[in-house]
Image (spheres, coloured by chain):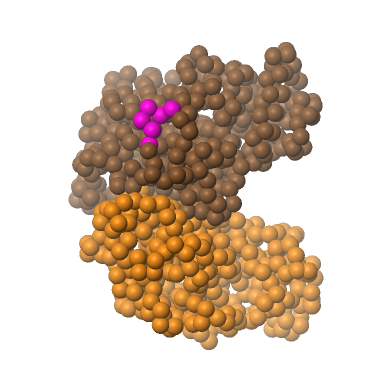
Chain colours: A brown, B orange
Amino acid sequence: MATKSYEHHFSSANLPFGIGSSAPTHEKPQAATRIDDSVIFLNDLAEDGLFSGIEGLPHGVFALDTLNEFAALPREVHQQVRRALQAALEDGGLSRFPDKSVESVSKVAMHMPVRVGDFSDFSCSLDHVQNAGRIATGKIGAPPAFAHHPIGYQGRASSIVVSGTPIPRPKGHFPTAGEVVFSPSTAVDYELEFAAVMGKPLPWGEQLSAAAAEDHIFGYVLLNDWSARDIQVFEMPPLGPFIGKNFGTTISPWVITPDALSPFKTSPPSPAQPTSKHLKVDPLSTYDIQTTAEIITEDTRTVTCTSKLAELHWTLPQAIAHLVSGGCGLRTGDIVATGTISGHQTGQYGCLLESTEGGRKPIVLKDGSARSYLKDGDTVEISAVAGGEDSGVGFGCCSGRLVGSKLTPPHACKVLLQAALEVAL
Amino acid sequence: MATKSYEHHFSSANLPFGIGSSAPTHEKPQAATRIDDSVIFLNDLAEDGLFSGIEGLPHGVFALDTLNEFAALPREVHQQVRRALQAALEDGGLSRFPDKSVESVSKVAMHMPVRVGDFSDFSCSLDHVQNAGRIATGKIGAPPAFAHHPIGYQGRASSIVVSGTPIPRPKGHFPTAGEVVFSPSTAVDYELEFAAVMGKPLPWGEQLSAAAAEDHIFGYVLLNDWSARDIQVFEMPPLGPFIGKNFGTTISPWVITPDALSPFKTSPPSPAQPTSKHLKVDPLSTYDIQTTAEIITEDTRTVTCTSKLAELHWTLPQAIAHLVSGGCGLRTGDIVATGTISGHQTGQYGCLLESTEGGRKPIVLKDGSARSYLKDGDTVEISAVAGGEDSGVGFGCCSGRLVGSKLTPPHACKVLLQAALEVAL
């Protein structure tokens, strides 16, 4: 199946930051931005003098193999780099840049944009917690704490990988046919998520308001929180998800800045009304961003979800303020994610657990095949645009192909998940 | 209250690794070992030629400010450094080392021994999961998955601190008097734990047997998993502990090697009988280590727990094998902890949740004061020895003082925890 280029996401109004490499000219991974279908290596521009007037931009920061050192700089430095790029582009387009700095996106390999510190994932969507709770436990309503703060858990940092990395089907323990087995998961799911990459650190013991949390966000990426539902449901009581999530998490390679997204600020339609001061936010506390998930097989692409960031009950700044409220601090490169972004009707569910009612009502792909959960060989591609497809500001994609064991009988998923639920709950 | 020196834990049979500094001779934190009440800076010994015959020991590795690069080296290199130190000590004791390399432990500040990758914490004690489950939910028995694998969760790496660092009382949400407040916790607890510091990394997607997991352990430390029970109980359903744990975790500064502990190998009295092959262990899969927790007030020390590592139902190698069973990999500096080490009777409970039955039956300290949970100013000191107090091999201590808000009425703890339980469960 042909890949999409997403070049219309990367107009000069976007100017994201990422880490790319391209043999033989840029063999070492280094900082880059993207215009349409071109990647521009920023250290070449720095050496050409484009950023020479910017105070506080360390020499060689764009030659490093992660964005951490750049992300930790004051927001004003990021903005000055952005303005220098935009001024050059207005002046003469890509021809204004040295030839050797510009490569076709098709020739560039993208790498992890940051060295991740801690990864915290949340459940910010009221629709998702209600749907997932009803499907997994039969109970209606959200967990007791959800009305007071976004609920989160600590994820694994070592297994966060960049878009394009194949994800092996994980093994784990789950019940089937009356016994608990250790076996490849038969219920591998995706979760469509949005995440903040932290820039300015926060010392251990300090706290933040949600409004102040925005100052600590370097930018945003898309995130697929791959989940093995059979393993996850069995292990969750009482300490939460672990092996069912820690086998792999995919992020998109381009970090989209708050400056690129600022024209798309909007209010949540039904904002959370927290009782605690530090979780209160300004009215324009989220972004008008439409998120999409597709399952791609050999022959077809099927859109399985379209949902909206702004419909989350809790915003990312609120999640960050809650995360640090006990005093744990933030490090540059920390990733804080929204959890599954779901709406409240068919076509808006951000994971298969919801779309298929826990595997009980398979969805049908465009090639006519059914999915309770993912099959080996399936690619899940998450994408997002701010405003609309013609805005010039999007996220490209966060893509990963499930690979691995062929042990799974295709009809077994719903039976197994049901068995797991009965044992666990 | 006078501090204990624990010098008898550090005979030449121990030879742990840590990161220390001492103005003005060793201002920059660097690698050290300890003999009795002396700290020996290893880079000085390296420059003096003590390790010159050791192939594969990089120049300057002991001058670095974490042990990660050393920990990642093959076990044989660690063993050769150990043998070189022991040979020198047999030859002439401390006088065999250059004067400038040796400092009194009282003049040395200890720092975090490693740059932590991911921190995973487990519930390996059957007594603890049964006690904590009964106290928190009223239900008898362990969670369904516990019989099949150790249950774990991902903790926060950024807030792991070295022994001696004061721990501020965290704030968080919990119910009290019919409403949910955001307030300093009134139920701060300690958890007496033991932890492995990982050395040799494991690539993403690979798996390990419990027997093979031992090869990846650089050494062991004590760990206090500080827990705010009111916050934790309210937030746990369904994603597990988060703010109630992430405010601070203390580890002991000296990493005790598997070579120092090998004479103390023993079998668990009632070993887990896993059905899955990768969790099977050799008979001598744990250590004869006695662990102790004390609460220290201004005037008195009160032993609140003595328990045994070997009584854990699951061993650390089993926890590590389970952690990576889905494919998440290991990085040098990852920390994997046992969870609370409790026995099955009074005096053997590794946290106040168990010792005080959830705050309902306060314990009495030697100064006559009662504790449901910790008061500001209380120091918790965890220590451990292998074999017995005369073995010459121990862990020193893992110590931290709770500091912070004075808001807590001393009698409120049990009322609040009960209210939290009623809302959450």
Q: Residue at x 70, y 28 (%)?
A: A80
Q: Is residue A163 visible?
A: no
Question: Horizontal placement of A157 versus A297: left or right?
Answer: right
In the image, taking residue A171 as reference, residue B196 lies left or right, namely: right
Which one is in front, A277 or A248?
A277
Using the image, determine if residue B17 lies above or below residue B296: above
Residue B374: give x, y in percent of width and height: 43, 69
So how many labels did they put on this image?
0
- Quadrant of the rendering where the N terminus of chain A is positioned: top left
Most foreground residue, B24 or A282: A282
Kindly identify the residue that appears in the image at 57 percent across and 25 percent down.
A260
Q: Position of residue B319 (x, y in %)?
A: 41, 60
Whether A271 is among the magenta residues is yes
Q: Is residue A386 magenta?
A: no
Position above or below: A92 against A405: above
- Magenta range: A267-272
- Please say whether residue A393 is visible from this viewpoint: yes
- Predominant SS of the magenta segment: loop
Dividing the picture into quarters, in which one does residue A90 lie?
Answer: top right
Residue A228 position, x and y percent, is 35, 42
Drawn side of residue B30 relative to residue B319, left or right: right
